[in-house]
Image (cartoon, grey):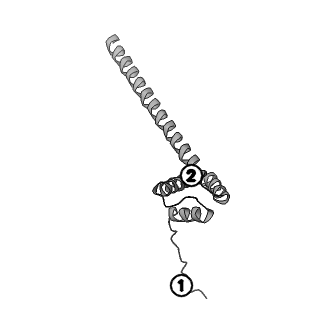
């Protein structure tokens, strides 16, 4: 039984090490991603008007993913040379393009007076 228990302990220890390594790798990737997002945010915010910046902050509080998507789109626009500054109208336009259209449902009541 001792050999089986030893093998079991070794296997458990191996899994623990592998899990710890994977977890650390994931943390490193997450930290790198957050650093990249912060860099993009810093660069884009410098080119935003006060109104656009205010709208961005509001969107970031309410919908963080949408705010991040908007940042990426704007950063790409800036990098491509399509824009030099971002005003509120341009920021709204980006948000509209990122928002999927809602399906309109119609209520049909047959036989209603």
Please give the residue where the numbered disc 2 appears in the rendered image.
44
Between circles 2 and 1, the one closer to the viewer is 2
Percent position (x, y) of residue 61? Answer: 63, 51
Percent position (x, y) of residue 67? Answer: 56, 54
Q: Residues within 10 Å of mark 2 (few under 14, many from 20)?
A: some
Q: Residue at x 51, y 68 (%)?
A: 101
Viewer-proximal residue, 75 or 13?
A: 75
Give the residue furthest to the bottom. Answer: 113
Please give the residue where the numbered disc 1 appears in the rendered image.
110
- Image position of 86 (left or right of 77): right
Q: Residue at x 58, y 46 (%)?
A: 42
Q: Residue at x 42, y 24 (%)?
A: 16
79 vs 97: above or below: above
Label 1 sits on a secondary structure element that is loop
- The tag on residue 17 is none
In which quadrant of the rendered image does the C terminus lie? Answer: bottom right
- How many dots with numbers? 2
Viewer-proximal residue, 36 or 64?
A: 36
In which quadrant of the rendered image does the N terminus lie? Answer: top left
The answer to whether mark 2 and mark 1 are in CB contact below 8 A is no
38 vs 60: above or below: above
Viewer-proximal residue, 5 or 79?
A: 79
Percent position (x, y) of residue 70? Answer: 53, 56
Q: Residues within 10 Å of mark 1 (few under 14, many from 20)?
A: few
């Amino acid at each position: 039984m001792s050999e089986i228990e030893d093998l079991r302990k070794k296997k458990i220890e191996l899994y623990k090490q592998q899990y710890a390594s994977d977890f650390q790798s994931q943390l490193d990737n997450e930290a790198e991603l957050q650093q990249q997002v912060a860099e993009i945010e810093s660069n884009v915010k410098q080119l935003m008007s006060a109104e656009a910046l205010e709208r961005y902050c509001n969107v970031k509080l309410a919908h963080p993913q949408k705010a991040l998507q908007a940042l990426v789109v704007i950063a790409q626009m800036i990098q491509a040379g399509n824009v030099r500054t971002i005003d509120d109208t341009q920021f709204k336009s980006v948000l509209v393009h990122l928002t999927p259209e809602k399906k309109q449902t119609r209520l049909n009541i047959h036989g209603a007076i």
